[in-house]
Image (tube, coloured by chain):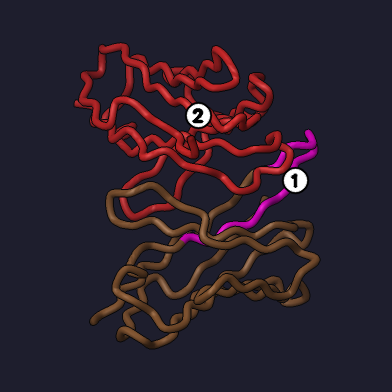
Amino acid sequence: GENVEQHPSTLSVQEGDSAVIKCTYSDSASNYFPWYKQELGKRPQLIIDIRSNVGEKKDQRIAVTLNKTAKHFSLHITETQPEDSAVYFCAARQRMDSGYSTLTFGKGTMLLVSP
Amino acid sequence: DTEVTQTPKHLVMGMTNKKSLKCEQHMGHRAMYWYKQKAKKPPELMFVYSYEKLSINESVPSRFSPECPNSSLLNLHLHALQPEDSALYLCASSQESAATNEKLFFGSGTQLSVL
């Protein structure tokens, strides 16, 4: 099955700095990679996603890059703000023989943005 | 309405009790999911319903019994749980069938404690 590794497990930055979280996956057939943000005591929320036919996607201060050859993808947050503080989960989608698909999540990165 | 609503928010039950978790969405989404999340861990998939049919059961013990009465509702019936089943139970939905597993909308979850 798919295996998703996520690094770092914790990341502390100063407000205004950039933050980068990296994930690697094992199944070369995986073709969809979402990122979820989960604030303390709240629900996970999709913040950005990318398909395997695209190398990069941006949405304001957030960007995701994908390197299919190396099987890794990264989340980039620029001009970080205290409200960016949360746990971020990457995930990779793998299609099963049944035709259905599942998401395999990374273990999460706790991002702390200090004012 | 762009929300997934879960009730109750908190539940404490004994190992001999029977209880049910409820989930509702009115976004017209065709796939609904149950995830289990332990503290500081990623969500773990339990069940997926696609077009009101159970399409994925991730080898979940029979003390957890899912039910999808209609396209907007999802229940999780609990019976004879163990203390290690204590966790946050998240419901999610997505617009397409479970074959895509894209853009999951999560509910706020039910924090379950088994005594």
Q: Does residue A12 appear left or right of residue A27 in this picture?
A: left
- Chain for disc number 1: A
Residue A92 lies, in percent from the top left, at 63, 57
- Using the image, determine if residue B11 lies above or below residue A76: above
Q: Is residue B68 above or below residue A17?
A: above
Secondary structure under badge 2? Answer: strand
Q: Are marks 2 and 1 on the same chain?
A: no
The chain assigned the colour red in the figure is B
Q: Tell me which residue sits at (30%, 86%) in the image.
A: A14
Residue A87 lies within the magenta run: no
Q: Residue B40 sits in which quadrant?
A: bottom left
Count how many numbered circles sit on residues in the image: 2
The residue labelled by disc 2 is B25
- Magenta part of the chain: A89-101
Rounded to the nearest angstrom, the CA distance separating label 2 from label 1 is 25 Å
- Horizontal and vertical percent for residue B89? 38, 35
Q: Residue at x 44, y 26 (%)?
A: B23
Residue at image location 49% in from the left, 75% down from the top: A21
> Which of the chains is brown?
A
